[in-house]
Image: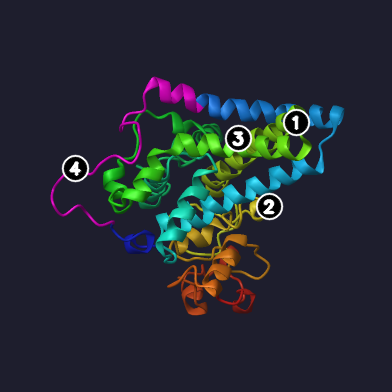
Amino acid sequence: MTTRSDVIADAPKATDGSTPPSATLGGEQKRSLEQITLLLFITVPFLALLAAVPLAWGWGVSWLDLGLLVFFYYLGCHGITIGFHRYFTHASFEAHRPRRIAMAIMGSLAVEGPLVRWVADHRKHHKFSDAEGDPHSPWRFGETLPALMKGLWWAHIGWMFDEEQTPQDKYAPDLIKDPAIRSISRQFIYWTMLSLALPAVIGGLVTMSWWGAFTGFFWGSLVRVCLLHHVTWSINSICHAVGKRPFKSRDRSGNVWWLAVLSCGESWHNLHHADPTSARHGVMRGQVDSSARIIRWFEMLGWAYDVRWPSRSRIDSRRNTGGDGSRRKEETAEAA
């Protein structure tokens, strides 16, 4: 079973007894204005996604627009998976300050909330995974089918409207005390504006037209944000409700293969909860994990060091002995 120390080491506390400064502009209670803003950020990109099919059917979609969508999607996705998740939340590797700041900015471009708030929520999730206290467990309301349907909605979107927010001074004091990281987190609205504006600016400049700017914004900003959000939220909902569980964990996290490419390897979620600090989530043969591959490239370039690659013995020690876990050892991918 996964122990407390496997999930995340206790974050260092402030030594002078002072109250650490906030790394977000809001307080620990989500105000009505914040909830309305959140609703807009969810519904507007979703409406754009619904409009994407008739728009593509009627006017088509250019290679430029598709390129903007794919580029900014995977830029933000890897910013979340490598930066926010594996580096800032779980310390799966170390990086020097310039790369640390770059990862904070890249993750912010995904428009998934301020860095410190994201990390605090996720650390709390691991502490109470699928138990009372988990911010977004799909099993929150019970195990009957109606309760699970309600829980999936909660884990996917509903939990973000909860007025109570995870205390960042408790779950992310190590990030709060870093002035640069705290500043990037507080400036989330500006990174959001930049993320939404860049595809429009590029589309307009390449085509030298307002129509190119509009389609660049539509596909590279709105549709891209909607797709990325729902893939990320699916890790919280779908990957805790279904999927194979070849590894021991104290929750219901599962591996969902069809989300692997879109989630940059995050959907190999069972291994992640069995070994949270591992830099690689897809450890079985054929399990695509682009985030781990990029971390490997970073290591080769000297941009990442002290990477926590899973050894074969560590992987085998976390296997279930029956059911989905009765896999042959040779199916394990080469460690790292």
* Residue situated in front as seen by the camera: 134 or 47: 47
Residue segment shown in magenta: 11-38
**What residue did someone put label 4 on?**
19
Vertical order, 269 against 319 (above or below): above
**As shown in the figure, which amino acid type bears the numbered disc 4?**
Thr
The colour scheme of the drawn protein is rainbow
Instruction: Choose top left, top right, bottom left or bottom right for residue 197.
Output: top right
Dot placed on the residue nearer the N-terminal end, 3 or 2: 3
Dot placed on the residue nearer the N-terminal end, 2 or 4: 4
> Marks 2 and 4, how far apart in space?
44 Å
Of badges 3 and 1, nearer the viewer stands 3
Asked if marks 1 and 4 touch (Cβ < 8 Å), the reply is no
Left or right, 303 with reference to 209: left
> Marks 3 and 1, how far apart in space?
19 Å
> Marks 2 and 1, how far apart in space?
22 Å
Helix, strand or loop under label 2: helix
Vertical order, 269 against 158 (above or below): below
Vertical order, 83 against 116 (above or below): below
Kindly identify the residue that appears in the image at 37 percent across and 64 percent down: 6
Residue 29 among those drawn in magenta: yes
**What residue did someone put label 3 on?**
197
- Across and down, in percent, residue 8 comes to 35, 59
Of badges 3 and 2, nearer the viewer stands 3
**As shown in the figure, which amino acid type bears the numbered disc 2?**
Trp
**What residue did someone put label 2 on?**
258
**What residue did someone put label 1 on?**
52
**As shown in the figure, which amino acid type bears the numbered disc 3?**
Ala
